[in-house]
Amino acid sequence: MYQFSEPFRDPTGSPIRELFKYLGEPGMISVAGGYPASDLFDLDGLQHAAANAWSQPARCLQYGPTDGLPELKDEIARIMRQRGVSVTSTETMVTTGSQQGFDLLLRVMIEPGDVVLTEQPAYPATLQALRMQRARVVTIPVDEDGLDVARLTAMLESGAAGRPKLLYTVPTFANPTGATLTRERRAALLDLAIRFDFLIVEDEPYADLRFAGEFVPSLLSLAEQMDGARERLVYLGSLSKIVAPGLRIGWLVAPSDIVRRCVVAKQTADLCSAPWLQAIGAAYLAEGALQRHLPRITGVYQRKCAALCDALDAQLGSVVQFQRPEGGMFVWARMDGIDASALLAQAIHERVLFVPGTAFYADRVDASTFRLSFAAPGVDEFGEAVSRLARARQSIQNG
Ligand code: PMP
């Protein structure tokens, strides 16, 4: 009989992907997945880019270099310059979504039992990848200003955080909390990485989706101005939330010796990301289409976020706590005394989907939390979504 490898003997799939089966049900409103609004995809811009890319069909159809098509790497360098960072070609590679970047990095850096620090709550696919790699996950709490850096400092100084190799964070419009790490905390976090000698993985798929508040520079751009910090930063970028996830275009920026090893790991993962999609992405970016597209989508997301938060205030204001995000796709909420998984079971009957907080905790689960995404539903659907949620709450309280 066959035998599975140790990490796959008892597989737990993504709890969010488990909800997909309900998505097609008639009348269902989903505030669950981190899906961009598909009616906002820039079809004309992408069609134009695809036609341009096809002017060299053999290039699109042939294998490409493992680290990515040079024209896409050039465009990524341009995006990074706009984000305040200069990168060389050997410090950058294209990945099949930023998820692959994280997966490759773990394969290159992490041995079973190595300590990796994560935010709590954190993006579930990150936790899943860490579990597969047999990392020892140590969680750091977050508040409305992102990672609690004072707490992290205390944990590092007392030894409670072990001797970490990596710290994973989504500092801007985090998944799931929507919170953004303040500039002061960013500087303090970089200091800690130098002092305690660990790598920071900065996952930044949402930063361009800002619709309120002040711009905060990335950890990587702040690290450029601080001696000894830059070589402690690994940056993950993605076109998924700002152009389209179907392109599966992400990138990793890191010191060249890390990138070189991630490229070797990618050779065994998929040889190269699809050149056809990379060529479309490169042409799209070269045409300046992203700069035209971003204000359009952030304007819509701003209205959707307001509609969701206003509905929560109006219909559940006395029982739900949440913070209005300044960008991204998520609202993180808490209903005291309610088990969000039980609430979801009832909400499915009421035809509304969300993600219970359990999915985002590596330990010490707060079962009363849940994540709502405002990206995909229509702006006029949130009032109904929240009244269904309120009915579901009523039912479990009565029942
Ligand atoms: N990081 C975070 C924080 C995310 O929310 C997501 C997508 N939900 C990803 C990475 C994965 O993005 P990609 O499509 O680029 O793999």
Image (tube, grey):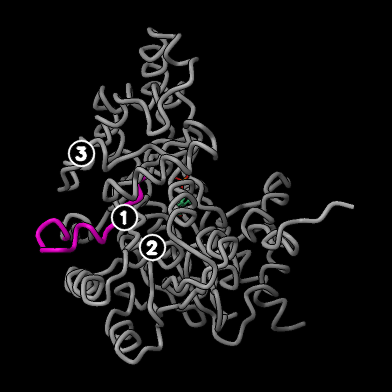
Tell whether 350 sits left or right of 93.
Answer: right
- For mark 1, what is the residue? 234
Q: Earlier in the sequence, mark 1 or mark 3?
A: 3
Which residue lies at the image location 10% right of the left edge and 63% below the top edge?
Answer: 227
Q: Which disc is residue 174 wearing?
A: 2
Is ligand 1 within 8 Å of the beta carbon of the residue shown at mark 3?
A: no
Name the element at disc 2. Answer: loop
Along the line of sight, which residue is nearer the eye, 367 or 322?
Answer: 367
Residue 177, percent from left and from top: 42, 68
- Give the magenta range: 223-237
In front of the other: label 3 or label 2? 3
Quarter of the image where one finds residue 343: bottom right
Q: Residue at x 18, y 68 (%)?
A: 183
The local crowd at label 3, few if under 14, some if 14 to 19, many if 20 or more residues have their Cα within 10 Å, is: few
Residue 348: image location, x then y, percent: 71, 61
Q: How many marks?
A: 3
User: Residue 136, image x and y in percent?
Assistant: 51, 74
Residue of label 3: 88
> Would residue 147 appear left or right of 77 to someone viewing this image?
right
Amino acid at the residue labelled 2 = Ala
